[in-house]
Amino acid sequence: MPSDIPSTGTPQARAGTLVRHAKLWLVPTALSALVALLLSLLYMGGILSPNDNLHRLPIALVDGDRSRPLPGQRENLGKQLTDAVVSAKGPSDSVAWRRLSGEAAEDALASGKVYGALVVPKDFTSSVAALTTDRATARPTLTVLTNPGVGSLGSSIAAQISQRAAGQASRTIGEQLADSSAAPTTRLLLTDPVAVTTRVGHPIGRHSGLGLTAFYYTLLLVLSGFIGGNLIHSGVDTALGYADSEIGPWHARRPTVPISRTQTLVLKMLMTAGISVLTTTLVMVATIAILGMDASHLPLLWIFSFCATVTIGLGVQAINAAFGGIGQLVSMFVFIALALPSSGATVPLEATPGFYRFLGTFEPMHQLSAGVRSILYFDARADAGLARAWIMIAVGVAAALAFGFAMTQYYDRRGLSRLTPQPA
């Protein structure tokens, strides 16, 4: 502290005098600058170039063509088209085409395992062959299926990729069938013989925010746990006399209650679990009962929401107990700053740089959003992300308890009591 900052019993200092002390500026300036820089890099780095960062985006490819091959060809056009789509030149590993049957593709869409599908109809070859005859009246059609439940951006990217692949296949087929002796109308039709239609492969409710309600609902759970945990942390410390209470001009300090760090953490964690019952209920009442968000499996949604909120809250308490005054900043980075851009709920992780895909393997928001998405859009299927979400919730609770109590017991064994100031 600067030497001329007055202590208790000396004349009061003036802001104009203190503002000239570099030491007062150093810590808040350095921390503010670091937080601003890191947040900017983290948030913007994950969304600027999703198409350039594509890595194995899963899209179903369905060859339903059951027509006979054209004369002189060994395979029908459906097989040729799907082979060409898979082998097409493009950025390495940008798309993971999954050859599936029609039923398997529907199941993959219904479980959120693919972001869309490109479907070749069963009469594709015969309908293309009709174009070279006088009976040609309409263009054959390929179908692009979207999956809004995995997020509007991810579904849109998959649809664009499927449409480009279908368009390139159409032009290739036209070149193969082109015949200078054909009628002018037929030759014109053969320049781009295949039409592409787009429809929803797995519909979601009208009040689902185009697939964004899962993300924002998860964000509400994370914020409830994060803010609630910090409020409980501050409130308990104030009530036990370890922190000052200031409301406007009123200041108070309660008598200090002798209690160990470990027992303080037990108290805060118990309160976190108890208060989460109320906050979880209010989140559901506000979003579903008042605002009308589409949601099913309500008992399961409540239980999952409660467990998710408690997990975040316990993590906050453990970090605050371990790091003290900077604990809120640390927990903000763990549960908010690093979690949001790696959630995969708005921008697919397959469309983010590798760093965010790495974070997504353990950051809580990605796991929780997958579980919420499964409950809201995919009939609470375990293989749609719900099973992994439950596992990661259990891992998160165990990690919070182990880390928090290991640190507080270490401090208690070292005699680092909070009752008196510790020596420098």
Image (cartoon, helix red, strand yellow):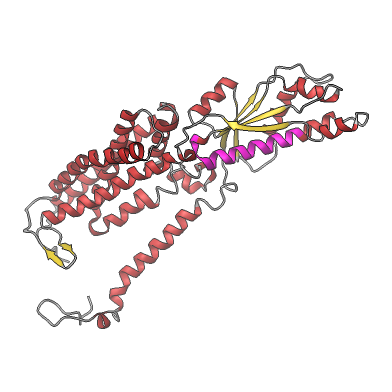
> Is residue 282 within the magenta segment?
no
At 20% from the left and 79% from the top, the residue drawn is: 5
Instruction: Indicate whether 255 appears above or below 317.
Output: below
Q: Is residue 75 visible?
A: no
Would you say 377 lies left or right of 264 here? Answer: right
In the displayed structure, would residue 263 be above or below residue 57?
Answer: below
Dominant secondary structure of the residues highlighted in magenta in the image: helix
User: For this view, does 136 lie left or right of residue 417?
Assistant: right
The quarter of the image holding the C terminus is bottom left
Find residue 86 and report its image quarter.
top right
In the image, taking residue 365 as reference, residue 129 lies left or right, namely right
What is the tally of numbered marks visible in this picture?
0
Judge by depth and name the residue closer to the eye, 267 or 156: 156
Residue 178, image x, y percentages: 86, 31
Residue drawn at (33%, 53%) of the image: 332
Residue 49, position in %: x, y? Answer: 57, 51
Report the span colored magenta.
149-170
Residue 358 image-quadrant placement: top left
| The quadrant where residue 116 appears | top right
Q: Is residue 167 magenta?
A: yes
Give the x, y percent position of residue 243: 15, 60
* Residue 407 picture location, percent across and down: 21, 49
Q: Is residue 384 visible?
A: yes
The residue located at (30%, 81%) in the rendering is: 20
Vertical comparison of 53 with 33: above or below: above
Q: Is residue 130 left or right of residue 18?
A: right
Q: Residue furthest right?
A: 181
Instruction: Please state, as top left, top right, bottom left or bottom right, where the N terminus lies in the image.
Output: bottom left
Q: Nearer the viewer, residue 181 or 386?
A: 181
